[in-house]
Image: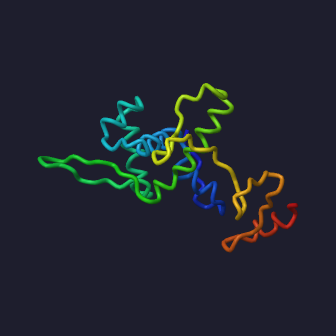
Amino acid sequence: MARKRFADMNCSVAQSLDIIGDWWTLLIVREALLGTQQFADFQSRLGIAKNILSKRLQRLVENEILMRVDIGRSGSRFAYRLTPRGKDLLTVITALREWGDRWIFGEGNEPVVIRDRRTGGLVPPLRITDGEGLAIEARHLRAEPGPGATREILERTRTLD
């Protein structure tokens, strides 16, 4: 069954999911954030089939999440490195990890914790904050049309609040 594409949907969430929305892709990005660069290392750490890994890596390169770097001294060998666009997915991966820690594993059972190399302290949980750094609850947020809003979004957001 073919996966639905969201290329025509005027929604940043849908467009992002069109690029990174399957589990293998996000796990590849997670591995890249942890320093994995070689095809064989991605494959062994994820237990992913070569054909699936090859397709996902190709798509990540096409969408400028990873760049393919020739590191071959004799023959062809490549490394996959995160681009600035790929590095920006750190927040997405962190949010998913924190959600899983809270709702799947539970406090005190986290498989991995993240520390700040500079201080040695645990990195605090992600939060949506205001300009002064104060946490904002979901009930205090409102969706409004942005500069790229379509007529449909303008009409839909008119009824929100």
- Residue 151, percent from left and from top: 75, 71
Q: Residue furthest front?
A: 119
Structure colour scheme: rainbow
Q: Looking at the image, which residue is at 61% across and 61% down? A: 8
Quadrant of the frame with the C terminus: bottom right
Judged from this view, the residue extending furthest toward the bottom is 147
Along the horizontal axis of the image, is 22 left or right of 78? right
**How many marks can you see?**
0
Measured along the vertical axis of the image, is residue 17 above or below residue 22?
below
Query: Measured along the vertical axis of the image, is residue 5 above or below residue 142?
Result: above
Q: Residue at x 39, y 44 (%)?
A: 55
- x 78%, y 69%: residue: 154
- Whole-percent x, y for residue 25 in the image: 48, 43
Q: Is residue 107 above or below residue 79?
A: above
Residue 145 lies left or right of residue 40; in this view the side is: right
Q: Position of residue 57 (x, y in %)?
A: 39, 47
Quadrant of the drawing holding the N terminus: top right
Image quadrant of residue 109?
Answer: top right
**In x, y percent, where is residue 49?**
38, 32
Front-most of residues 133 and 24: 133
Q: Is residue 13 left or right of residue 71?
A: right
Residue at 26%, 48% in the rendered image? 78
